[in-house]
Image: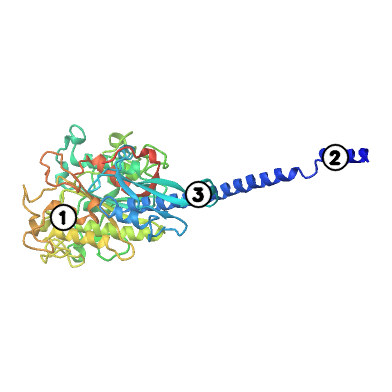
């Protein structure tokens, strides 16, 4: 009996069956806890990603309407705050903190810090308190998360058709030493166009050059072949159709019968081109491009003997007639519509540089005394075409382009020494007449721009009018202006938050 009892006792003491159960129970608690942490962590990460996306959307929406739009309101609309477009039922986000910033790196690239915001980018910050499930058992009821996003006003390429309209009237021969010694306004303007072309993207941006006065179409190549032998023949202003959807030469006819002569006249010097640079990454203009030749940087292929230029072109030169830009605007708009039809998905742009003082004489225009009935005549009516109300006609032409149904054209204007009524008379032919009576050259250039931020002014040359300034007092040389326009021809984009170093 004793031996039997002893064996039973030892069996009880030595039997380890069932001792794993406490460990299993403990590990199950640990695994469930870790699983709960993973679930809570995954949910927090998902909500953080959603909040970041909403913050990105808010920054992009706000930057898109800068500098003059309600960027704060746009950012709020696209934020994750309650009742807004990116609000969520799984978390509650605070109202966004919206901060306009001036990023020096963007400014150096040509994106100015301008206007009411004095900024070129927008930073948006949002936060949210996320309730937990399993972590609450450990005393962590909520986890606070925050996100930030910064969007530049521009920088992402979009495809454009760009029509540059350049004033080549005699006033462009005036000296402007602000872009170098012994430089004329025309040479400074062409150098500015060079900066524009260096900052556009030839893979997507098609560029054409127009000038006024118009010229004999058969002579246009003289501005692009670098021969240096002679300049195109300037003709009296002719008047393209206001409603044309493609560009065609206008006709200037004189005489009748056997003595009748007809000349094809054009405002377009170079058709839409993409060969101005060899690639988007190239940092120089192509030496074989007609567009490069026209603005004085090509090597050219024309001319021989003493007229041949082995390097460099003189480019376009000034003509005789005085300023009248309405016809050039209508010509450029018709050409843009045709180009856009060939390139689906592109947007149209006009860039007009002039002093804005339209002063063409009746004799500078095709009229009943210097042309026959085969030519559209200018009249004294004050509406296009007319030698009365010339600045106003330019305003109406630009408005027509900027509000074209379905395909509005972005119109940029550069006032180059444009006078205001503070120190000069109004546009002479508009005094008390026309669609915009008593308008000044500076006001005409401002009004032609399709939005306030599309107007620029360079008044630094001798005789320039400091009263003619762009919104936000943008003090730029022509080089800086053309760089800024090139940057505006891009769309908003996100940039690293670390670039947001300067707050106005």
User: Which residue corresponds to mark 2?
Assistant: 9
The image position of residue 345, as x and y in percent, is: 41, 58
| Disc 2 secondary structure class | helix
Say few, some or many: other residues with alpha carbon within 10 Å of mark 1 (under 14 / 14 to 19 / 20 or more).
many
Mark 3 Cα within 10 Å, few/some/many (few <14, many 20+)? Answer: many
Q: Which residue is mark 1?
A: 444
Q: CA distance from mark 3 to mark 1?
A: 57 Å
The single residue placed furthest to the front in the displayed view is 1
Secondary structure category for the residue under label 1 = helix
Query: Which sits in the foreground, 420 or 100?
Result: 100
Whether residue 425 is visible, yes or no, is yes
Question: Could you tell me residue 61's position as x and y percent?
Answer: 35, 54
Q: Nearer the viewer, mark 1 or mark 2?
A: 2
- Position in image of residue 105 (x %, y %): 33, 37
Confirm whether residue 262 shows in the render: no
Looking at the image, is 442 positioned above or below residue 299?
below
* Drawn side of residue 179 relative to residue 52, left or right: left
Q: Which mark is residue 80?
A: none
Task: State the image coordinates of residue 435 (x, y, percent, origin top left).
Answer: 13, 64
- State which quadrant residue 317 falls in: top left
Decide which of tag 3 and tag 1 comes sooner along the chain. Answer: 3
Residue 189: quarter of image? top left
Q: Residue at x 67, y 44 (%)?
A: 26
Residue 390 horizontal side relative to residue 123, left or right: left
Whichever of callouts 1 and 2 sits on the residue coming sooner in the sequence is 2
Lower sequence index among marks 2 and 3 = 2
**Residue 338 occupies which quadrant of the picture?**
bottom left
Q: In front here: 276 or 83?
A: 83
- Residue on which disc 3 sits: 44
Question: Mark 2, mark 3: which one is toward the viewer?
Answer: 2
Q: Quadrant of the C terminus?
A: top left
Q: Are marks 3 and 1 in contact (CB under 8 Å)?
A: no
């Amino acid at each position: 009996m004793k031996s039997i009892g002893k064996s039973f006792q030892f069996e009880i003491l030595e039997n380890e069956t069932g001792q794993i159960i406490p460990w299993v129970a403990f590990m199950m608690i640990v695994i469930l806890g870790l699983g709960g942490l993973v679930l809570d962590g995954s949910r927090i990460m998902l909500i953080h990603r959603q909040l970041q996306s909403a913050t990105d959307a808010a920054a992009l929406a706000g930057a898109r309407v800068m500098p003059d739009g309600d960027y704060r309101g746009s950012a709020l609309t696209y934020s994750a705050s309650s009742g807004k477009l990116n609000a969520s039922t799984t978390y509650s986000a605070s109202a966004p903190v919206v901060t306009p910033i001036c990023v020096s790196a963007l400014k150096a690239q040509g994106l100015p810090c301008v206007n009411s915001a004095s900024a070129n980018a927008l930073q948006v910050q949002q936060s949210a308190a996320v309730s937990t499930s399993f972590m609450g058992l450990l005393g962590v009821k909520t986890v606070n998360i925050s996100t930030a996003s910064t969007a530049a006003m521009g920088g992402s390429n979009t495809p454009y058709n760009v029509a540059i309209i350049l004033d080549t009237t005699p006033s462009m021969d005036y000296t402007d030493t602000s872009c170098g010694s012994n430089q004329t306004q025309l040479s400074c303007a062409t150098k500015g166009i060079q900066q524009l072309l260096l900052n556009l993207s030839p893979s997507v941006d098609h560029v054409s050059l127009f000038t006024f006065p118009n010229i004999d179409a058969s002579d246009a190549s003289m501005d692009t072949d670098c021969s240096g032998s002679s300049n195109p023949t300037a003709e009296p202003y002719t008047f393209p159709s206001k409603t044309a959807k493609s560009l065609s030469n206008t006709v200037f006819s004189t005489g009748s019968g056997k003595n009748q002569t007809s000349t094809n006249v054009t405002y377009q010097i170079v058709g839409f081109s993409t060969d101005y640079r060899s690639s988007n990454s190239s940092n120089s203009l192509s030496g074989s491009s007609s567009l490069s030749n026209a603005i004085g940087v090509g090597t050219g292929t024309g001319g021989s003997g003493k007229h041949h230029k082995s390097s460099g072109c003189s480019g376009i030169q000034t003509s005789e007639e005085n300023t009248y830009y309405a016809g050039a605007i209508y010509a450029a708009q018709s050409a843009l519509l045709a180009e856009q039809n060939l390139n689906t998905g592109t947007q149209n742009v006009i860039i007009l540089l002039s002093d804005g003082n339209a002063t063409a004489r009746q004799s500078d225009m095709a009229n009943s005394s210097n042309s026959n009935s085969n030519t559209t005549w200018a009249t004294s009516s004050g509406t296009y075409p007319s030698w009365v109300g010339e600045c106003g006609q330019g305003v109406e032409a630009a408005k027509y382009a900027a509000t074209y149904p379905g395909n509005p054209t972005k119109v940029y204007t550069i006032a180059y020494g444009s006078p205001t009524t503070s120190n000069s008379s109004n546009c002479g032919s508009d005094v008390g007449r026309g669609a915009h009576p008593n308008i000044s050259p500076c006001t005409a250039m401002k009004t032609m721009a399709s939005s306030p931020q599309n107007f620029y002014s360079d008044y630094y040359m001798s005789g320039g009018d400091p009263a003619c300034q762009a919104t936000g007092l943008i003090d730029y040389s022509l080089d800086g202006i053309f760089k800024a326009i090139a940057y505006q021809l891009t769309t908003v984009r996100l940039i690293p938050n670390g670039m947001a170093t300067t707050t106005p």
